[in-house]
Amino acid sequence: MIESDPKGFILLLAAMTVTVYLTRAGGYWLIGRVTIGPRLRRMLNALPGAVIASTIAPILVQGGVRALLSMLAAATVMYFLRRDFAAVAAGVAVAAGAFAFGL
């Protein structure tokens, strides 16, 4: 049986917090010393979409029909309504429906 160590957990949590803070603060510090030209600006503007695509791609590859239907529903609602919450709700509803029908 694995015993829990509260001191070790708190130390680990503190180390992770410091690491995340230093990574974020270091990024802001570094970007403050770089001249942002048109090419870098285009790359930074495209970055959120790339992060979302890299998150969604493995889900689509491994998720099967249910994941594909959910993503299509969410994308369709987002295209027509331009509302994030509505797109997420549509994706979840389609996933639940597909699950209920055994897909």
Image (cartoon, helix red, strand yellow):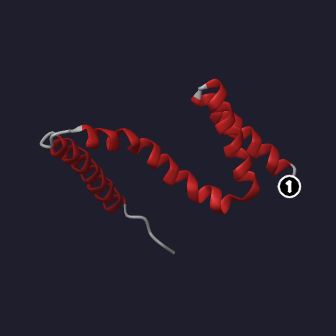
Task: Quarter of the image for the C terminus: give it.
Answer: bottom right
Q: Foreground residue, 2 or 25?
A: 25
Q: Secondary structure at mark 1?
A: loop
Residue sitting at the far left: 33
Using residue 69 as the reference point, say whether residue 32 is left or right of it. Answer: left
Q: In this picture, is 103 found above or below 86?
A: below
* Residue 74 picture location, percent across and down: 66, 38
Q: Quick one: label 1, few (<14), some, or many (20+) residues within 10 Å?
A: few
- Total label count? 1
* Residue 41 picture location, percent across and down: 29, 38
Instruction: Identify residue for label 1.
Output: 102
Residue at the image position 71 percent from the left and 39 percent from the top: 73
* Residue 59 picture location, percent across and down: 61, 56
Using residue 44 as the reference point, say whether residue 78 is left or right of it. Answer: right
Q: Quadrant of residue 19?
A: bottom left
Residue at the image position 81 percent from the left and 43 percent from the top: 97
Q: In this picture, is 37 found above or below 7?
A: above
Using residue 67 as the reference point, say whether residue 30 is left or right of it. Answer: left
Q: Quadrant of residue 89?
A: top right
Residue type at mark 1 is Gly
Q: Quadrant of residue 64?
A: bottom right
* Residue 96 picture location, percent across and down: 77, 44
Q: Foreground residue, 70 or 11?
A: 70
